[in-house]
Image (cartoon, rainbow, N blue to C red):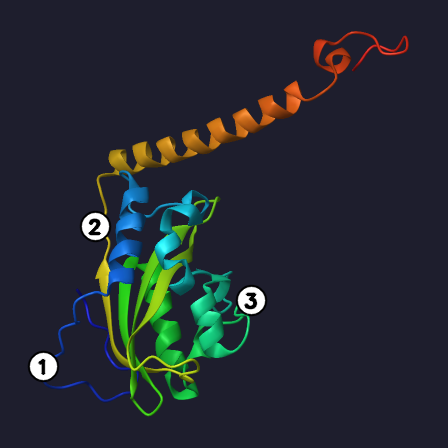
Amino acid sequence: MKHLPPLDDMPQTGSRRVMPPPTPAMVDVRAYWQGLCRGQPVPFRSQIDPAQITSVLDRAFVLERRRSELARFRVAGSQLCTAMGMDLRGMPMISLFDPSERRRCSDWLDHILSQPATGEMTLTAGDATVQARMLVLPLRSDMGQIDRMLGCLEITSNGIDHPGLYRIGDLATTPIPRPPRADVAEGYARALSRRFRRSRRAFCRAARSQPASLSTGREVNGVSPM
């Protein structure tokens, strides 16, 4: 696990803190994400099935970062939206943080996508009376780019309805091991094959729902189909 350096010019001295054990929500989300990998280092966003993580949906989120834009919420659980007092969809993820922490958070997310790596964070809010944990895991778009993220945010102590903006306690990233090139290609091929099969089944269902005259190629009103 790699701890990110501070963003100021002064090097951090002394021993670094060890990240605390993961919360139950973090364990569930990470296990689900790992199950989606199936031989590929980073799974696809299209593989996410909310029905498989119903127990943590209220604390889960999906982020998207397009080109040089900030990472924004595509999906945000009800507990997150309630805590911030608004619907977070479309909002920058860094809007959850105190302004002094936003650059550090943004750099952390960039690191997760560029490595790629998994990320963990400890947070405080409400004059440090509220403590929380965050997990962020990279995802691929349908085009294969690593520009999505699956994550969860769980308050671990002194939970209140509106904790306010968060401050970062500690950050950590864990690089994702890169399998041999052949294994990567095989994993991508399997993922693409599954999406092709789903598309083919959808096409076949649509074809079967068409009138028999169109699906069999018979003339309709004396006009042959093209």
User: What amino acid does circle 2 point to?
Assistant: Pro
- Residue identified by numbered label 3: 90
Mark 1 to mark 2 CA distance (whole Å)? 26 Å
- Residue identified by numbered label 2: 177
> Left or right of 67: which side holds 47?
left
- The residue at the far left in this view is 15
Residue situated in front as seen by the camera: 102 or 47: 47
State which quadrant residue 206 falls in: top right
Indicate the position of residue 129 as horizontal and vertical percent values. Answer: 29, 88
Q: Is residue 153 above or below residue 139?
A: below
CB contact under 8 Å: marks 3 and 1: no
Q: Residue at x 27, y 87 (%)?
A: 9
Residue situated in front as seen by the camera: 183 or 153: 153
Mark 3 to mark 2 CA distance (whole Å)? 31 Å
In the picture, the quarter occupied by the C terminus is: top right
Indicate the position of residue 10 as horizontal and vertical percent values. Answer: 23, 89
Indicate the position of residue 125 as horizontal and vertical percent values. Answer: 34, 85
Which of the two discs, 3 and 1, labels the residue nearer the N terminus? 1
Q: Residue at x 47, y 27 (%)?
A: 197
Indicate the position of residue 198 as horizontal and vertical percent values. Answer: 49, 30
Q: Is residue 129 above or below residue 161?
A: below
Label at residue 15: 1
User: What amino acid does circle 1 point to?
Assistant: Ser
Residue situated in front as seen by the camera: 127 or 176: 127
- Give the label, 3 or 1, closer to the camera: 3
